[in-house]
Image (spheres, rainbow, N blue to C red):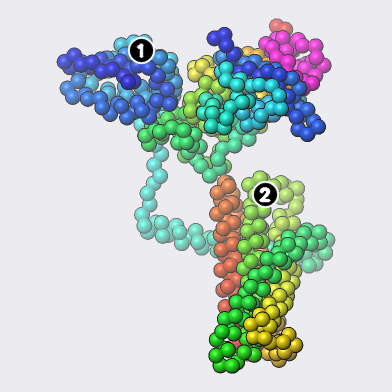
């Protein structure tokens, strides 16, 4: 037991016993709830039997004394330990009662307004970032010295070359899935040969570039945001600015240009692997000779089929790079922000890629290719 | 002061590959003193600290905290032990996604079973104790100045009411006025809470204002003694450290 209470009519003698240290604070708090104080007018608080006392224990005594003293007298029956005095002094300085800072609760209307204006200024910031980057790019066109070939090459390597295995694998699997599903349906009509059309047109026009863009958004969009965000947290961006080097020029532009180079190349690989995957499946499943498959490929594609897919790649690349670098630049303050904005970068990149793909589909239909 | 020392480091060897950082280093810290560790860059001050904290096992030798040899403890026992000391790191190492108050509450939440009210009030008490204003408790580390971060880190180190405190360069990066205020805070906390403090520092002002005894890492060993003994030590590096250009202003005052 951490205390002993003795009643003498209206007086209570409360002797605190044993260890009053941080390890016991939880238990003591719970045991104090059993203390009955009905009709007690005066409390004699005896601290002399405490064996060890630390700051947390002293706070508990301080708190107990304050609560007891609300509607009765409390007298210390033993000398006040210095630790207790320290607690009282520390809390007095601030007037502890008013300490808890209230986070003001806002009305629904105010929240709505704040949210809307935050969103709007977010859009403006994004637009400003885009504008500055394009301006820098145009400036770089005039002045070839600001092109950073080594940096661009590094990003082509990181976002392109190292992504080849996964992009190829996914393209292969997707082609197999389309061919298999198509074969199942078309076999019923004896229209096996159209499986080739389905795979070729599907992969070249849409799926090759779209899946590649989504994989790259996940791999590189997040990497861009995390790299730049960590540099931001580490004050490296400030250091660049202070050295008179424009971060947009050395960090953002090479990533954009690198990805604009890498994504179309990856798309070509995805297209090739996809068509090859279709050939393998047709060979196994439909016993179609490779020669016949590739003849049919040749017949099924129009002059534009390949280019309709590939022309989208640089646009997707810019969207992914923009989302990654912009969100990276927005990081400030804490490591949680870094994680949040990296997530936002990837989600937005994928969303914008799919949205742009839909717009392209409408556009190509309108111009009839 | 009780007779048995709080920390006994005996004859430890720390090696990284072919490089030997400590070779038969010994150190002893008595209860209730402020012990300063000094040494050149790369002399292994932080390695020594990590060894004493049990974050690194030395290749040889033993480290005893309050008589318990920590080099042979199992991980679960080491966890228990880590509740008995507080540490601040050089750059503060506050958790950036938590407020100052939450930073202080984290060790309490992990190791203790407290009511919400006690958790809130005790954490706030620690924040106030290190001389931060109450508003600072609800701020994030990125919103604090360098001096406030050092104080907040101290508040977190004190969260579990340790008797033993380790500080890694507590005043580095502070202006002389903030550093002096921190020294003063440290001395008064040490006295009022009966702490034993081990501190790595490069700040001569801090050493002269706070430390009872000093240990200097030279030649992979520790030479320790009272401030006077160390200042008069004939070792060339120690002479350079305490009598060099940056230290000369202390020479005169010491003689007086």
Kindly indicate whether the residue at mark 2 contacts the one at mark 1 (C-beta within 8 angstroms). Answer: no
Front residue of B229/B30: it is B30
Q: Chain of mark 2?
A: A
Q: Seen in the image, is A290 located left or right of residue A182?
A: right
Q: Is residue A31 left or right of residue B190?
A: left
Residue A21 versus residue A145 in the image, above or below = above
Where residue A292 appears, as percent x and y from the top left, is 72, 89
Say above or below: A5 vs A112.
Answer: above
Disc with the residue nearer the chain's start (1 vs 2): 1
Asked whether A25 or A352 is in front, the reply is A25
Q: Which mark is residue A231?
A: 2
Out of A265 and A321, give the one closest to the viewer: A265
Point out the frontmost of discs 1 and 2.
1
Horizontal relation, residue A61 to residue B55: left or right: left
Label 1 to label 2, Cα distance in Å?
Answer: 57 Å
Name, please, the residue furthest toward the bottom: A190
Residue B256 percent coordinates (x, y): 70, 6
Residue farthest to the top, as pictured = B256
What is the magenta range? B218-245
Residue placed under numbered mark 1 in the picture: A49
Q: Which mark is residue B57?
A: none
Would you identify the image quadrant in which residue A93 lies? Answer: top left
Residue A72 point in image, percent of width and height: 23, 21
Asked which quadrant contains residue A265, the reply is bottom right
Q: Which residue is located at x 71 percent, y 19 percent?
A: B11
Do the dots labelled 1 and 2 sit on one chain? Answer: yes
Q: Residue B200 occupies which quadrant of the picture?
A: top right
Q: Secondary structure at mark 2?
A: helix
Q: Residues within 10 Å of mark 2 (few under 14, many from 20)?
A: some
Say above or below: A159 vs A304. above
Q: Is residue B222 on the magenta stretch?
A: yes
Residue depicted at x 73% and y 15% = B223
């Amino acid at each position: 037991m951490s205390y002993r209470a003795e009643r003498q009519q209206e007086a209570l003698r409360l002797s605190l016993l044993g260890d009053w240290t941080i390890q016991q604070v939880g238990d003591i708090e719970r045991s104090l709830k059993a203390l009955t104080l009905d009709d007690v007018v005066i409390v004699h608080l005896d601290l002399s039997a405490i064996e060890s006392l630390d700051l947390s224990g002293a706070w508990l005594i301080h708190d107990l004394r304050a609560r007891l003293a609300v509607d009765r007298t409390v007298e210390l029956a033993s000398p006040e330990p210095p630790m207790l005095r320290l607690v009282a002094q520390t809390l007095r300085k601030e007037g502890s009662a008013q300490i808890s800072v209230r986070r003001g609760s806002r009305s629904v209307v105010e929240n709505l307004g704040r949210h809307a204006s935050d969103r709007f200024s977010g859009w403006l910031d994004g637009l400003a970032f885009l504008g500055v980057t394009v301006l820098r790019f145009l400036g770089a066109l005039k002045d070839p010295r600001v092109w950073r070939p080594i940096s661009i090459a590094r990003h082509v390597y990181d976002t392109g070359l190292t992504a080849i295995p996964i992009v190829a694998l996914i393209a292969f699997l997707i082609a197999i899935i389309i061919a298999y599903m198509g074969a199942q349906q078309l076999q019923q009509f004896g229209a096996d040969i159209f499986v080739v059309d389905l795979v070729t047109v599907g992969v070249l026009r849409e799926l090759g570039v779209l899946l590649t863009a989504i994989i790259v958004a996940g791999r590189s969009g997040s990497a861009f945001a995390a790299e730049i965000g960590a540099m931001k947290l580490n004050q490296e961006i400030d250091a660049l600015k202070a050295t008179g080097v424009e971060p947009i020029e050395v960090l953002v532009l090479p990533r954009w240009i690198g990805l604009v180079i890498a994504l179309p190349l990856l798309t070509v690989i995805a297209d090739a692997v996809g068509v090859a995957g279709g050939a393998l499946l047709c060979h196994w499943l439909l016993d179609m000779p490779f020669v016949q498959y590739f003849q049919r490929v040749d017949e099924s594609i129009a002059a534009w089929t390949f280019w309709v897919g590939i022309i989208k790649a640089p646009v997707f690349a810019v969207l992914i790079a923009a989302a990654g670098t912009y969100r990276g630049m927005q990081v400030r303050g804490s490591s949680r922000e870094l994680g949040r904005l990296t997530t936002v970068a990837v989600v937005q990149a994928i969303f914008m890629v799919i949205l742009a793909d839909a717009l392209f589909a409408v556009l190509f239909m309108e111009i009839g290719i | 002061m009780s007779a048995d020392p709080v920390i006994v480091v005996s004859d430890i060897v720390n090696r990284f590959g072919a490089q030997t950082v400590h070779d038969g280093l010994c150190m002893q810290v008595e209860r209730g003193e402020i012990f300063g560790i000094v040494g050149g860059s790369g002399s292994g001050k932080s390695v020594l600290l990590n060894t004493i904290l049990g974050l690194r096992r030395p290749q040889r030798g033993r480290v005893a905290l309050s008589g318990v040899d920590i080099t042979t403890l199992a991980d679960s026992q080491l966890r228990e032990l880590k509740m008995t000391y507080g540490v601040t790191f050089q750059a503060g190492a506050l958790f950036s996604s938590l407020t100052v108050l939450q930073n202080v509450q984290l060790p309490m939440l992990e190791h203790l079973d407290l009511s919400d009210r006690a958790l809130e009030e005790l954490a706030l008490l620690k924040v106030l104790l290190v001389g931060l204003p109450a508003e600072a408790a609800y701020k994030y580390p990125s919103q604090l100045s360098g001096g406030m971060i050092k104080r907040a880190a101290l508040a977190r180190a004190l969260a579990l009411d340790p008797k033993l405190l380790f500080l890694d360069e507590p005043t580095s990066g502070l202006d002389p006025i903030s550093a002096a205020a921190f020294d003063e805070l440290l001395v008064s906390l040490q006295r009022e809470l009966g702490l034993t403090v081990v501190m790595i520092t490069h700040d001569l002002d801090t050493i002269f204002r706070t430390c009872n005894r000093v240990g200097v890492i030279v030649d992979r060993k520790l030479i320790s003694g009272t401030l006077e003994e160390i200042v008069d030590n004939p070792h060339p590096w120690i002479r350079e450290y305490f009598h060099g250009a940056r230290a000369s202003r202390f020479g005169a005052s010491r003689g007086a």
